[in-house]
Image: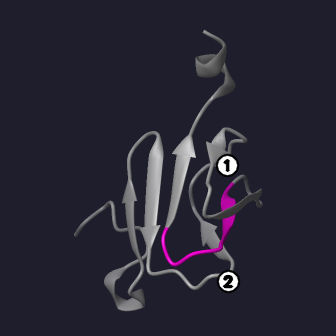
Amino acid sequence: EDKNNLVGPDTGISVEKTDKKIVINNLTPGKYYWLKIGYHSAWRSKEGKIYQSLPGFMIVAPTKENMTLEYHPLINSIF
């Protein structure tokens, strides 16, 4: 079992995850997806919007079929 594939092969959606990057492929633009990954305001994406959901996870709304989320904490941009 591939632990990086958070969605499952039956959906056609694939997810690759590292500590600072999440790449999600084969999404439907305009549809909302709930990610069981801890939300932090340092997550950024140019391919859609990221929202906080309960209990502390994320909801993403992609504008393209593929979405990349990158973690850019403020502390790294100060120093």
Query: What span is colored magenta in the figure?
Result: 57-66
The quadrant of the rendering that contains the N terminus is bottom left
Q: Residue at x 69, y 78 (%)?
A: 32
- Residue at image point 44% right, 60% down: 23
Specify the amino acid type for callout 1: Tyr
Q: Position of residue 35 (x, y in %)?
A: 59, 65
| Residue ID for mark 2 | 31
Quarter of the rendering containing residue 5: bottom left
Q: Secondary structure at mark 1?
A: loop
In the image, 55 versus 65, the foreground residue is 65
Discs 2, 1 touching: Cβ within 8 Å:
no
In the image, residue 35 sits, relative to residue 22, either above or below, namely: below
**Extreme top residue here?**
79
Residue at figure coordinates x 72%, y 52% from the top left: 56
Query: In which image quadrant can residue 54 be found?
Result: bottom right
Cα gap from disc 2 to disc 1, whole angstroms: 19 Å
Tell me the residue that label 1 is attached to: 39
- Identify the element where label 2 is drawn: loop
Q: Position of residue 3 (x, y in %)?
A: 31, 61
Q: Is residue 59 above or below residue 72?
A: below
Farthest residue, direction bottom = 10
Which of label 2 and label 1 is nearer to you?
A: 2
Question: Is residue 76 placed above or below 70 in the rendered structure?
Answer: above
The C terminus - image quarter: top right
What amino acid is at disc 2?
A: Lys
Asked whether 65 falls inside the magenta stretch, the response is yes
State the residue at coordinates (57%, 61%): 36
